[in-house]
Image: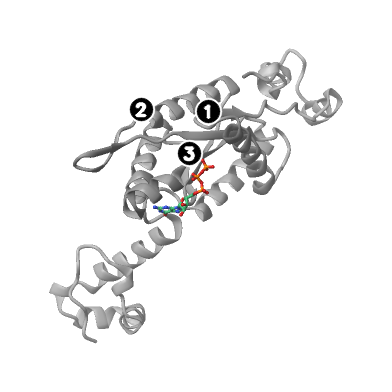
Amino acid sequence: MSLPAIPSSIDLSDLRLDEARALLGSDDATFAAMDAEADPRAYLQKVIDGLVDLSLKDPLTGLSNRRYFNAELEAEIDRVARSGEAALLLMLDIDHFKSVNDTYGHAAGDQVLQAVAKALQSCVRPMDTLARYGGEEFAVVLPSCQPAFGEVVAERIRRTIESTAIQISPSVDLRVTISIGGAFALQWIRSTTLLWTDRADQQLYIAKSGGRNRLCLETQPESTVSAEEKSLLFGHLSASDPAWIELTSGAAMGSTAQR
Ligand SMILES: Nc1nc2c(ncn2[C@@H]2O[C@H](COP(=O)(O)OP(=O)(O)OP(=O)(O)O)[C@@H](O)[C@H]2O)c(=O)[nH]1
C-alpha cells in the first residue's frame, strides 16, 4: 500500500476512502513492513482523533457541538434527579447578528463567532459544558449552581461580551451584545433535554423581546416532592441526622426562588 505523505495535522476532507480502508485493514505484520519514516500508526491515530473531534466539536469555534452538549445535558438531568443538586442551563444568543453579516460580510461574522466563543470560555468553570448550539446561539450547562451564583455568572457573561472589542480588520473593531435565557433543572425529577431547553429558550425570548443585551432567569421551580414523599425517600435517616437536616432545608430542596 502506498501511503500519503504524513501531515502534522489531518484534514479529513483530504483523506481518501481507499487509504483509510487500507490503514484500518492493516495488521501488525503489514505495519512492520511499511516504511518506518511514514509511521502509518501515527497517521491512523491522527485520523481517528480527527474523526472524534469532528463528531464532538464545532469546527468554527472549537467548542462542543450540539450533539455532545445534549449528551452532557442528559447526564446532568440524571445527576440532578438522583442528587437533587441545583443545575442551571443558559441559552445565549448574539443580538442583531444578521446585521454584522450584512454590514461586514460572512467572514467577519465568523470572526465574531470565534471571539464570542473565546470570551464565553473565559467566563465559565472547567466543570461547565459550553457549546455552540447552532448559528449564533450558544449554550452552557452549569452543574452544582445555586440561583445566586447562576445570576452572577450570567451577568458576568453579559458584561464580558459587551466589553469585548473584536478586531475584524486592522481598522475595524466591533462590539456585540448577547441576550441570555436561563432555567434551572427540576430537582429530584427526571425531566428531558427538550423540556429543559424549552424553558431556557422561553427566557431567552423574554430577554430578546425585552430589549436584548439582558438576562432572564426562570425562578427555580418549587420542588414537587412533598414532605411526605421526602420522608418515604429518606425515612431511614433520623431527624437529627445531618444528612436529613441538609435534605429538608430550603438550600437542598431549592424551595426559594432568588433573582
Ligand atoms: N457568519 C456566520 N453567520 C451565521 C452562521 N450561522 C448563522 N449565521 C447567521 O446568523 C444570522 C442570524 O440572524 P437572525 O436569526 O435574524 O438573528 P439576529 O440578527 O441575531 O437577531 P436577534 O437574534 O433577534 O437579535 C443570520 O444572518 C445567519 O446567516 C455562521 O456560521 N457564520
- Residue 99: name its quadrant: top left
- Height in image: 62 above or below 115? below
Residue 112's x, y, as percent?
35, 44
Distance in Å between CA atoms under marks 1 and 2: 14 Å
Furthest-bottom residue in this view? 1
- Residue 146: name its quadrant: top right
Point out which mark residue 214 bears: 1
Point out which mark residue 163 bears: 2
Furthest-right residue in this view? 228
Q: Can residue 88 be seen by looking at this rendering?
A: no
**Residue positioned 75% across, 28% down in the render:** 223
Distance in Å between CA atoms under marks 3 and 1: 10 Å
The three-letter code of the residue at mark 3 reads Asp
Towards the viewer: 33 or 118:
118
Q: Secondary structure at mark 2?
A: loop
**Badge 2 local density, few (<14 within 10 Å), some, or many (20+)?**
few
The three-letter code of the residue at mark 2 reads Ser
Residue 197's x, y, as percent?
63, 43
Q: Earlier in the sequence, mark 1 or mark 2?
A: 2
